[in-house]
Image (cartoon, grey):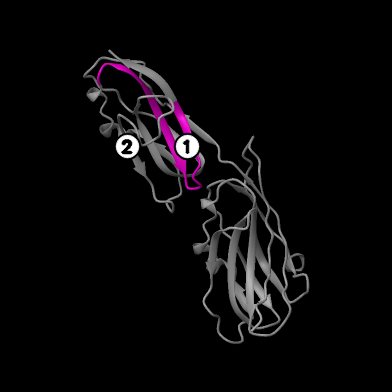
Amino acid sequence: MKRKIISLFITMLLIVSCTVPMASISASAEEVESVKGYFTITDPYFPSALTESYPRAIGGIINSENNLLSVSIEVWDVDGGIILSAYSDVLPLNTKTYDLSKLDNQLHLNLLKPGNYIFDIYIDFWDDIDSDYKTFTLTVNPASFSSTNIGYPTSITQGRGFPVTGTVRSTGNITKVWVGAYSSSTAAPDSYIVGASETISVFSYVQGYNLANLDSKVVFNNLSKGTYYYKVMVELSSGTRYTYINRAFTVV
């Protein structure tokens, strides 16, 4: 049996200077008719702009003149590697429509790093017909970061504590937070001398975090005299890391 392919080519263009509001393509069935006319997509929903690490749904109903065997989606990087994929089961004989949102829970676009990708929808037909496709484009923008009321020490008397306060925010999906005292400004997030971290489910879609949640775990009074760096960092579901605070302080 000959496999037939419907391709949606989506180029994700990284714009590093700003984050723009997200939008979606809202097109008529005629606008998303396939090149060879074997299918249309009614009520299509594909993002035309995507913020890094933010969850985004896809949707639309495939209507085919021929019997559908299966539907799959694959996201490729520019080097031809598959980054994300989603697959339907074998569809019942004489199926001519398919709801693309059924694959959405397998396809986590918030895991993608900023960059350029190819987004393909593949369809296998029971019938022996030529392949067909339709093309879209997508712009992806990096997440932005902000914070409020983050306190930081400048000098602490040995044996005394310091309260961890403030809120960190991102337009992306925060999946890990670190707070602590480090030996250098370039120390890795998990290499704190005293500190704590919290890992958040990638499916929680957290965009704000109260640092006071880690206050009791960051024990400054255990530090010896010397110079340290107070750091507050987060990681997004895409893997991007951001440092909010990286300041030297002393224990005297």
* Residue under the image location 21 percent in, 19 percent down: 159
Q: Is residue 11 above or below residue 106?
A: above
The quadrant of the picture occupied by the N terminus is bottom right
Per the picture, the main secondary structure of the magenta-coloured stretch is strand
Say whether residue 242 is magenta.
Answer: yes
Residue 205 position within the rendered picture, expressed as x and y whole percent measured from the top left: 46, 49
- Amino acid type, label 2: Asn
Q: Is 192 or 91 nearer to us in this picture?
A: 192
**Is residue 165 visible to the viewer in this orientation of the structure?**
yes
| Label drawn at residue 169 | 1
Asked whether, in this view, residue 163 is left or right of residue 84, the answer is: left
Asked whether, in this view, residue 34 is left or right of residue 2, the answer is: right
The quadrant of the picture occupied by the C terminus is top left
* Residue under the image location 78 percent in, 70 percent down: 35
Residue 92 position within the rendered picture, expressed as x and y whole percent measured from the top left: 55, 84
Looking at the image, is mark 1 or mark 2 earlier in the sequence? 1
* Residue under the image location 51 percent in, 52 percent down: 111
**Quadrant in the picture for residue 192:** top left
Point out the stretch of residues depicted in magenta.
224-245
Q: Is 153 or 209 nearer to us in this picture?
A: 153
Asked whether, in this view, residue 144 is left or right of residue 162, the answer is: right
Question: Which residue lies under the disc numbered 2?
Answer: 213
**Quadrant in the picture for residue 251:** top left
Callout 1: few (<14), some (14-19), or many (20+) C-alpha neighbours within 10 Å? some
Residue 86 position within the rendered picture, expressed as x and y whole percent measured from the top left: 53, 66
